[in-house]
Amino acid sequence: MTRQTDIPALAQGVASGDRRALARAITLVESGRADHRADALALLGALGQEKQALRIGLSGTPGVGKSTFIESFGLMLTGMGKRVAVLAVDPSSARSGGSILGDKTRMDHLAREPNAFIRPSPSQTQLGGVARRSREAVALCEAAGYDVVLIETVGVGQSETVVAQMADLFVLLLAPAGGDELQGVKRGIMEMADLILVNKADGDLKTQATRTCADYAGALRLLRKRPQDPDGFPKALTVSAIEAKGLQEAWQEMATLADWRREQGIWAQTRRDQAGYWFAQDLRNGLLELVQNDAATAARMQQAQEDVQAGRKTPAAAAAEVLEPLADKLKN
Ligand code: GDP
């Protein structure tokens, strides 16, 4: 079998921290082609999992200041001598083909830093696919020796869960708001956050940001204590991405939390749990794909779907009819 990509050379390039090689490697894992898939798996296998970055998931609604924050925060980290990679998991690309990173000129300054790597989100057709590719892109950034991988997502619910499953820390960026807007953040999202950062704590918005931060700090104290938290976490802080204020403090909190989790073995356990989660996801998606790629089965599924929608069959009976011949096949 001839490979189109020289995998050992590409692996070498990624491992040595070459950004062009990393970009090519991510393109490879994002590809939907079967032969590329085989290459991608060979590449990920060749790179191994020895190097570990701090993976930070960052979520917030559009306009809250995610790109501004990533730019200032990223620049602060590169200023500290850290290598920073930025990736995006974009659920909207599943619908529109657009992306949160890349369609606007964002993070210009950070993009020019030799110690930073910014990757726009892939345009894909379904969240599951986007998720797998993003997770593999994270693994590639780690293998390339980045110290911090920022994984950005737009806050719409579904994508946060996916990002939380590939991150060590989950940061929620919020805007200053009136008290009644506190309920606008879904409880489930609040419960995922390790750190809430109320952005835009500057100028006229400063007082409001401080009050909002106190409200969220109060709300966080009401949540059930999680085993993955030391005393005082999760926390809420104010920041100003534009004025680069509060960023040191935010980083300090992240580092404290990460260190504590490492010492307690929670970090390693979480990564093991995440690996299990992704294995189950890949297996489920792969099984579904296998079944759907079988023309006869696909036709039966389609027929059963129509029967159910037309009221000719119950959902359970129709599903059983589709599955029965498959189960028989597996028995033989
Ligand atoms: P994103 O959609 O979450 O990526 O948000 P952007 O980073 O594009 O920012 C949205 C708007 O908020 C822009 O007009 C920014 O200039 C503004 N913004 C971002 N951070 C701050 C901040 O710290 N203070 C103030 N006052 N405005 C900010």
Image: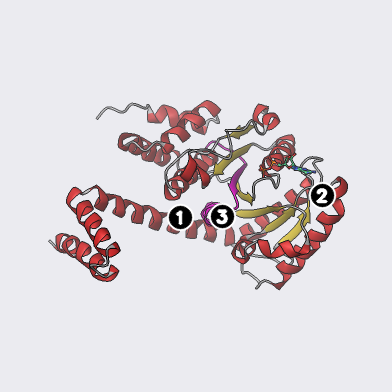
- Of the image marks 3 and 1, the number of the one nearer the N terminus: 3
Dots 3, 2 in contact, CB < 8 A: no
- The span picked out in magenta is 144-167
User: To which quarter of the image does residue 181 belong?
Assistant: bottom right
What is the number of the mark on residue 275?
A: 1
Alpha carbons under labels 3 and 1: distance apart? 17 Å
- Of the image marks 3 and 2, the number of the one nearer the N terminus: 3
Position in image of residue 96 (x %, y %): 49, 41
Residue on which disc 3 sits: 160
Determine the residue positioned at 55% across, 28% down.
19
Front position among marks 3 and 1? 3
**Amino acid at the residue labelled 2:** Ala
- Of the image marks 1 and 2, the number of the one nearer the N terminus: 2
Residue on which disc 2 sits: 201
In-image side of 153 versus 210 (left or right): left
Q: Is the C-beta of the residue carrying label 2 under 8 Å from the nearest atom of ligand 1?
A: yes
Q: Between residue 312 and residue 106, name the one nearer to us.
A: 312
Dots 1, 2 in contact, CB < 8 A: no
Residue 243 highlighted magenta (yes or no): no
Position in image of residue 64 (x %, y %): 70, 47
Determine the residue positioned at 60% across, 45% down.
152
Alpha carbons under labels 1 and 2: distance apart? 37 Å
Front position among marks 1 and 2? 2
Neighbor class of circle 2 (other Cα within 10 Å; few <14, some 14-19, many 20+) is: many
Determine the residue positioned at 74% across, 52% down.
175
Position in image of residue 47 (x %, y %): 45, 39
Neighbor class of circle 3 (other Cα within 10 Å; few <14, some 14-19, many 20+) is: many
Is residue 157 depicted above or below 3 in this figure?
below
User: To which quarter of the image does residue 227 belong?
Assistant: bottom right
